[in-house]
């Protein structure tokens, strides 16, 4: 018996979902001496981070939309670098609005270009402060947040139409917390993220997740749907799928947005000169175009061919891939009901982006999975009952 388990016998654990959260939990629990089965209804690992080399062009494609790993968590960074060669990648985004191309996030160049000025950082700060709706003291909605911190013109140019397309509702209906993820800069830095570690695995996320799962006492079953209950002989279930789906959505579905992708092959080595171009005007039906060769400039792809995808956002139906939790008022009420149901269900722990109905960047998903594994191992070693949630939704 593994010493880390103390006096508790090893458990047989089923993990539903072979994405990043499920893979990290499998590795850590197996490392503590437990026997782990990981199953996924898809025929690949890595969930929505799945990457694969396009056979026609040699380009590494992010099959469910681009993912850039970024973190300030040193434990998480050390963890991923155990399993993949992480290639530095500085993510930059441009935005098409009113027939012009701007830099995102909104920075000093964006501000000067939009307002036709040549302001210094100090002048721009004062100018934007004058644009803001100072009467909104505690922003409650996305729209409040935008008007309070960037003002009407920036909001109307870059955020209002794009938000309506992306979320399918009025910005006044969305929580202010969504906009807090978007920085406003008063210098010419056009990097999308501020974290010290920003990278993409050289061989893609799927190979990284395969490496995490390549451990003794881990059995992988792909193309295997979860039937609603763990099979005989399983001591504990870890569920990383949608929380409402576990309960057959009998309280009603939680709201998600999904994405449709339109593939565009081009007979040239560079279509748009940037990995991501956002389309902010509401009249343009797609939200952005991603050119995937730019996500892996080190790869040996065909020099005279490129591959782009137009993205369209819409409400997710029962058979669609859920991407973004809406968390509108009705969703939050329904979520609290599902959480109470989950806490009353023994033998199951819900984790991950879908299991906790939360938008999690990859580093936070890994950090939470590591913490969940520690809590479960400690609880079982002490003879306790595993919680339904280590991190409440």
Image (spheres, rainbow, N blue to C red):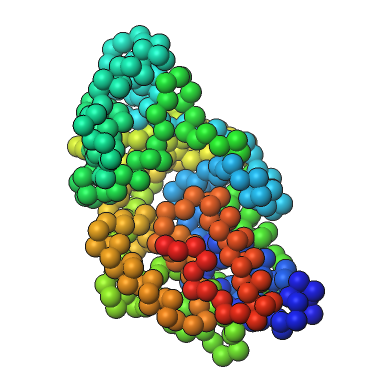
Name the residue rendered at 61%, 68% in the picture: 375
Quarter assignment of residue 34: bottom right
Name the residue rendered at 67%, 65% in the picture: 28
Instruction: Say whether residue 139 is visible.
Output: yes
Question: How many numbered marks appear?
Answer: 0
Quarter assignment of residue 129: top left
Name the residue rendered at 56%, 50% in the picture: 363
Give x and y (percent) for residue 381. 69, 77
Instruction: Say whether residue 264 is visible.
Output: no
Give x and y (percent) for residue 79. 67, 52
Considering every residue shown, the one lying at the far bottom of the view is 232
Give x and y (percent) for residue 133. 23, 29
Q: Is residue 35 left or right of residue 206?
A: right
Foreground residue, 246 or 89? 246
Give x and y (percent) for residue 393. 42, 62
Placement of the N terminus among the 4 image quadrants: bottom right
């Amino acid at each position: 018996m593994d010493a880390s388990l103390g006096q508790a016998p090893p458990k047989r654990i089923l993990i539903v979902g072979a994405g990043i959260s499920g893979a990290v939990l499998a590795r850590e629990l197996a490392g503590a001496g437990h026997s782990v089965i990981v199953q996924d209804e898809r025929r690949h690992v890595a969930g929505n981070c799945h990457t694969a080399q396009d056979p026609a062009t040699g380009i590494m494609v992010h099959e469910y939309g681009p993912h850039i790993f970024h973190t300030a968590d040193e434990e998480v960074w050390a963890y991923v670098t155990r399993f993949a060669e992480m290639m530095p990648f500085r993510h930059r985004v441009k935005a098409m609005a009113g027939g012009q191309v701007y830099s995102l996030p909104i920075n000093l160049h964006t501000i000067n270009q939009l307002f036709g000025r040549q302001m210094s950082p100090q002048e721009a700060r004062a100018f934007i402060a004058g644009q803001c709706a100072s009467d909104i003291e505690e922003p409650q909605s996305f729209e409040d947040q935008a008007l309070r911190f960037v003002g009407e013109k920036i909001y109307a140019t870059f955020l209002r139409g794009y938000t309506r397309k992306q979320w399918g509702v009025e910005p006044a209906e969305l929580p202010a917390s969504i906009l807090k993820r978007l920085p406003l800069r008063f210098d010419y830095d056009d990097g999308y993220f501020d974290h010290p570690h920003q990278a993409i695995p050289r061989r893609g996320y799927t190979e990284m997740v395969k490496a995490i799962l390549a451990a003794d006492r881990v059995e992988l079953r792909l193309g295997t749907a979860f039937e609603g209950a763990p099979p005989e002989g399983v001591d504990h279930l870890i569920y990383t799928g949608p929380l409402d789906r576990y309960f057959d959505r009998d309280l009603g579905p939680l709201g998600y947005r999904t994405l449709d992708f339109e593939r565009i092959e081009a007979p040239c080595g560079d279509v748009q000169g940037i990995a991501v171009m956002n389309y902010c005007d509401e009249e343009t039906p797609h939200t952005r175009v991603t050119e995937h060769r730019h996500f892996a400039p080190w790869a040996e792809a065909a020099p005279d061919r490129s591959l782009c995808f137009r993205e369209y956002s819409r409400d997710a139906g029962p058979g669609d891939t859920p991407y973004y939790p809406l968390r509108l008022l009705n969703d939050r009420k329904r979520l609290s009901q599902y959480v109470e149901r989950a806490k009353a269900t023994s033998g199951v722990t819900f984790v991950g982006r879908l299991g906790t109905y939360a938008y999690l960047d990859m580093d936070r998903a890994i950090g939470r999975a590591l913490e969940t594994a520690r809590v479960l191992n400690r609880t079982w070693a002490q003879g306790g009952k595993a919680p339904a949630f280590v991190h409440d939704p």
